[in-house]
Image (cartoon, rainbow, N blue to C red):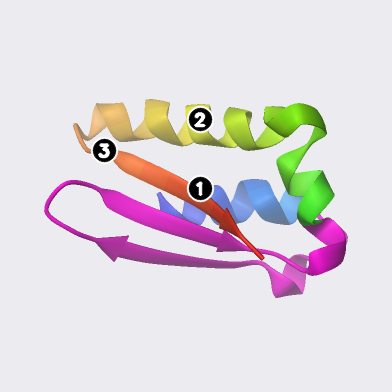
Amino acid sequence: MKELVEVIAKSLVDYPDQVVVTETENEKAIVLELRVAQFDMGKVIGKQGRIAKAIRSVVKAAASKEEKKVIVEIMQ
């Protein structure tokens, strides 16, 4: 899942070298934290959060194959 979020984010931003995805796992779910450059926050979130919602939907679909719950958090 981490690689999937990383590839999607790097294709959206102007500074792909500053994209960092950290993965933590607890008993309930896998939490993916996406960090991008401050200038790229708007590109990752999109108008009214549409791109962020689309990223979460793609990751959720990929996680359903593995029967895991994945949470994507976009951080600054």
Residue 44 on the magenta segment: no
Query: Is 70 placed left or right of 76 in the picture?
Result: left
Q: Do the residues bearing badges 2 and 1 touch, measured as CB atoms within 8 Å?
A: yes
Secondary element at tag 3: loop
Circle 1 Cα neighbour tier, 10 Å, few/some/many (<14 / 14–19 / ≥20): few
Residue drawn at point x = 23 percent, y = 47 percent = 29
Distance (Cα) linking label 2 and label 1? 9 Å
In the image, residue 17 above or below residue 32: below
Secondary element at tag 2: helix
Q: Do the residues bearing badges 2 and 3 touch, measured as CB atoms within 8 Å?
A: no
Residue drawn at point x = 50 percent, y = 30 percent = 58
Front residue of 10 and 29: 29
Residue drawn at point x = 18 percent, y = 58 percent = 26
Range of residues picked out in magenta: 13-40
Residue indicated by mark 3: 69
Residue indicated by mark 1: 4
Hey, which residue is sitting farthest front in the picture?
A: 48
Q: Amino acid at mark 1?
A: Leu
Would you identify the image quadrant in which residue 51 lies? top right
Secondary element at tag 1: helix
Q: Which mark is residue 18?
A: none
Q: Amino acid at mark 3?
A: Lys
Distance (Cα) linking label 2 and label 3? 12 Å
Residue indicated by mark 2: 58
Q: Do the residues bearing badges 3 and 1 touch, measured as CB atoms within 8 Å?
A: no
Distance (Cα) linking label 3 and label 1? 15 Å
